[in-house]
């Protein structure tokens, strides 16, 4: 049994009205889920303000309300806790309610623009293979040891996070690896959690629709490292000039990794092929089925973190060499006649540059590179023309199509993208709003040996249009078109 006093530990309220020594059955930030015995936490969100739903929570039999401001007519028969920041309070309350599960796990957070999913997922797979029960919280899936759940957010809210981690503790997990998004940091979703370590991948142009400026975006990422304790480690990529910025104010032990500069952990690509690459990783010859310098950097981050977590070097390298790519991350599909299709989640200019650069490093020179790309609706518009320009400059043919248009018109998004394409590239650029038709056309254009890049959606199995998610899977679509193609 938890009392209100128990779950308010480490909270410093501005005001408290009512009884604190009362039993609490549940905590909620969604008024629709409130039931008798619940605590309702009113969050001032970006889309809606939870304070507007206090009355609905009262009608559902709520026992206490945590808020930043009292309503004019507040009921005296329940307990009111006024706090400076409801989102931060919710993290601490959720941790207390679920018996502070992050204190019982070795929790490692991964943040940055690109590479978070690959690093968190492969760390999870690595530690499972090393014999450690582990959990995963990622863009693709949530895992509690061998149980998997559909992912709803890169970093779920404070209540879901702590509930998942409590389940991990219950089944005996030692480790948890999680992606930490910039949205999560800005919205205090990691408040109340204790991290054993953090990994910084890189930071590039993204999410300016939410953060408004690059400086705000950078500060959101940096705040994660600011919050690490002196017992934690911070593993940072210093190939990115903002790597050192991330840890300017951290108390954590800092370790660096890099492909190009002197660092605590180094790697170098020796050979690249479509079936993998040869590296020198921390002084050792190393083969991996993963492809591309960006994946070499991801592997280096994973290796560095595993060493910091006290694992054996030889065992780390042995297991890493057998791990395959994460769904939708430079995932290859080959047709019967030798057309290589690559499915990748790249949806920022920098991610597209990395993927296209990797393809050029592997290709022999005579193959045609056909890129299918779109941009998400109701997201950062400033990156759209840059994404199109990057693809046009680095591909033999480009097909601009829909991604997840959400509540925007696909034609408007495509028009924004094509403004970035120079006149010299317009002849090799097509616009096909229907993503199915765009992929079909790319396959029709391709000859044996050619390469098709389908970018932007990766692991996603839906296309979001006007608030509805319709089934759409890029990999599934490519396989279908390969099967239907007369030349395959």
Image (cartoon, helix red, strand yellow):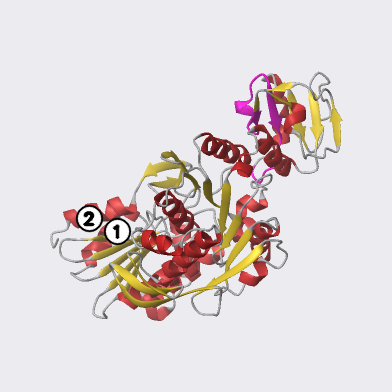
Task: Report whether residue 43 is seen.
Answer: no
Seen from the viewer's position, the closer of residues 448 and 7 is 7
Looking at the rendering, the stretch of residues picked out in magenta corresponds to: 27-47
Q: Quadrant of residue 369?
A: bottom left
Seen from the viewer's position, the closer of residues 43 and 252 is 252
Identify the residue position indicated by label 1 in the image.
439
Please provide percent x and percent y for residue 58: 72, 22
Rendered residue at 70%/40% (across/down): 92
Which one is earlier in the sequence, the residue at label 2 or at label 1? 1
Please provide percent x and percent y for residue 307: 51, 62
Q: Is residue 32 magenta?
A: yes
Query: What's the mark number on residue 176?
Result: none
Seen from the viewer's position, the closer of residues 76 and 470 is 76
Residue 38 drawn above or below residue 230: above
Q: Residues within 10 Å of mark 2 (few under 14, many from 20)?
A: many
Please provide percent x and percent y for residue 382: 56, 65
| Separation of marks 2 and 1 at Cα, in angstroms | 8 Å
Q: Quadrant of residue 38?
A: top right
Report if the CB atoms under discs 2 and 1 are less than 8 Å apart. Answer: yes
Identify the residue position indicated by label 2 in the image.
481
Please provide percent x and percent y for residue 275: 28, 67
Rendered residue at 18%/54% (across/down): 483
Q: Secondary structure at mark 1?
A: helix
Seen from the viewer's position, the closer of residues 92 and 232 is 232
- Could you tell whether 76 is left or right of 101 in the image? right
Task: Report whether residue 41 is seen.
Answer: yes
Q: Secondary structure at mark 2?
A: helix
Residue 30 drawn above or below residue 177: above
């Amino acid at each position: 049994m938890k009392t209100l006093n128990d779950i308010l530990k480490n909270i410093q309220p501005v005001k408290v009205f009512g009884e604190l020594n009362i039993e609490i059955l549940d905590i909620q930030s969604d008024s629709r889920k409130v039931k008798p015995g619940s605590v309702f936490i009113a969050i001032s969100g970006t889309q809606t303000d939870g304070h507007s739903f206090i009355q609905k929570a009262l009608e559902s039999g709520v026992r206490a309300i945590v808020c930043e401001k009292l309503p004019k007519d507040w009921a005296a028969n329940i307990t009111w806790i006024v706090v400076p920041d409801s989102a931060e309070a919710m993290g601490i309350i959720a941790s207390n309610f679920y018996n502070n599960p992050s204190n019982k796990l070795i929790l490692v957070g991964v943040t940055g623009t690109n590479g978070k999913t690959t690093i968190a997922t492969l760390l999870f797979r690595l530690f499972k293979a090393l014999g450690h029960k582990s959990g995963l919280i990622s863009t693709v899936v949530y895992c509690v040891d061998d149980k998997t759940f559909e992912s709803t957010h890169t970093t779920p809210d404070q209540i879901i996070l702590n509930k998942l981690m409590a389940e991990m503790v219950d089944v005996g997990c030692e480790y948890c690896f999680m992606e930490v998004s910039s949205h999560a940091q800005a919205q205090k979703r990691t408040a109340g959690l204790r991290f054993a370590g953090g990994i910084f991948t890189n930071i590039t142009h993204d999410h300016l629709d939410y953060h408004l400026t690059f400086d705000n975006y950078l500060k959101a990422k940096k705040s994660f490292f600011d919050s690490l304790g002196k017992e934690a480690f911070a593993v940072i990529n210093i190939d990115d000039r903002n790597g050192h910025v991330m840890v300017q104010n951290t108390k954590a032990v800092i370790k660096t990794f890099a492909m190009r500069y002197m660092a605590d952990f180094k790697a170098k690509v020796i050979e690249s092929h479509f079936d993998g690459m040869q590296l020198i990783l921390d002084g050792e010859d190393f083969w991996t089925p993963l492809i591309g310098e960006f994946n070499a950097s991801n592997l280096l981050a994973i290796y560095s973190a595993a060493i910091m977590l006290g694992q054996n070097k030889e065992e780390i390298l042995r297991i890493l060499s057998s791990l395959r790519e994460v769904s939708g991350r430079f995932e290859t599909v080959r047709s019967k006649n030798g057309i290589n299709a690559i499915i990748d989640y790249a949806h920022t200019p920098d991610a597209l540059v990395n993927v296209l650069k990797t393809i050029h490093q592997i290709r022999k020179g005579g193959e045609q590179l056909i890129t299918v790309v779109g941009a998400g609706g109701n997201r950062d518009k400033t990156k759209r023309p840059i994404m199109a320009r990057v693809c046009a400059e680095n591909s033999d043919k480009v097909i601009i199509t829909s991604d997840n248009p959400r509540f925007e018109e696909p034609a408007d998004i495509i028009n924004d993208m094509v403004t970035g394409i120079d006149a010299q590239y317009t002849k090799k650029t097509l616009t096909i709003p229907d993503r199915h038709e765009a992929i079909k056309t790319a396959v029709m254009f391709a000859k044996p040996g050619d390469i098709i890049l389908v970018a932007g959606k990766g692991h996603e199995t839906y296309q979001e249009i006007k608030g509805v998610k319709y089934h759409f899977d890029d990999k599934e679509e490519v396989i279908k078109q390969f099967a239907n193609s007369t030349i395959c």
